[in-house]
């Protein structure tokens, strides 16, 4: 796995993340609810495969861009007092547009996308901000009577804070209401992990969504 120094340098040079996001204004008395933890799932690629890349839509020497609706996911990582946390390692992994993971354990017979990266990582900047460019993953059969809705896995870690593993869902997906993992989350916390996306004015044909994450100090 690449060194933290190399990954931080990558963040500094990655498509203008610094200044591209706005941290939410938080008063001293404000309290942020810890983002709900969810299962890692069976398809975590492992730290040895996570790359210091926050654009999953292109692969070196690929024949073209990834298939699917291109999106940006951005947000602020905060502590439970709503203060932004800098230098947080944010990892994501997900299925491609067909609903398949690039993982030996995935029994899905859907086609893999050789032009999609499947996983990546970044670090939050001084304002606690992160950003990823990726695609909307496809739904996939988790069991004979259960299709998982499109979702993206997140792992958030920094020394001095409790590691958080969670999942982000897409607002408006019909499968959300029948998902056996999402339904375990109390209703008051469920909306925190369901993100609405809208057209991105800065890049035609892409969409933007905001997923803020709150973590707890050890």
Image: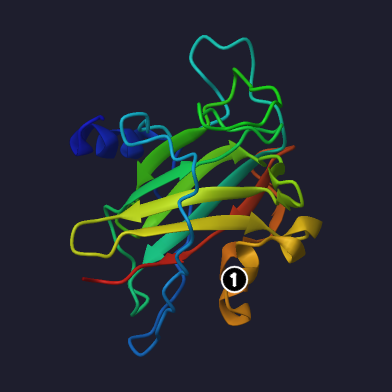
Quadrant in which the N terminus appears: top left
Q: Residue at x 31, y 30 (%)?
A: 48
Q: Residue at x 44, y 75 (%)?
A: 25
List the single residue furthest toward the right.
174
Query: Residue 133: horizontal and vertical position, in percent?
Result: 55, 39
Q: Is residue 31 visible?
A: yes
Secondary structure under badge 1?
A: helix
Picture quadrant of residue 28 = bottom left
Q: Is residue 155 above or below residue 1?
A: below
Q: Left or right: where does residue 67 sit relative to residue 130?
A: right
Q: Which residue is mark 1?
A: 184
Q: Is residue 82 above or below residue 175?
A: below
Query: Residue 96: horizontal and vertical position, in percent?
Result: 63, 32
Q: Left or right: where does residue 183 sit relative to residue 76?
A: right
Query: Residue 64: horizontal and vertical position, in percent?
Result: 64, 15
* In-front residue for pair 210/163: 163
């Amino acid at each position: 796995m690449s060194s933290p120094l190399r990954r931080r340098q990558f963040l500094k040079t990655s498509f203008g993340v610094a200044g591209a996001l706005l941290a939410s204004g938080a008063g001293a008395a404000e309290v942020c609810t810890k983002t709900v933890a969810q299962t890692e799932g069976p398809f975590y690629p492992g730290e040895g495969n996570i790359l210091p890349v926050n654009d999953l839509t292109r692969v070196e020497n690929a024949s073209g861009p990834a298939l699917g609706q291109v999106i940006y996911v951005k947000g602020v990582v905060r502590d439970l007092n709503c203060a932004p946390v800098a230098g947080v390692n944010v990892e994501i992994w997900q299925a491609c547009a067909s609903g398949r993971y690039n993982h030996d354990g995935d029994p899905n017979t859907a086609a893999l996308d050789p032009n999609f990266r499947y996983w990546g990582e970044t670090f939050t900047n001084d304002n606690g901000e992160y950003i990823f460019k990726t695609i909307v993953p496809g739904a996939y059969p988790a069991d004979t009577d259960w299709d998982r809705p499109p979702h993206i896995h997140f792992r958030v870690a920094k020394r001095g804070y409790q590691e958080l593993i969670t999942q982000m869902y897409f607002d408006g997906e019909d499968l959300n209401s029948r998902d056996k993992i999402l339904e375990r989350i109390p209703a008051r916390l469920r909306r925190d992990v369901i993100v609405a996306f809208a057209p991105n004015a800065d890049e035609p044909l892409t969409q933007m969504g905001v997923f803020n994450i709150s973590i707890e100090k050890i």
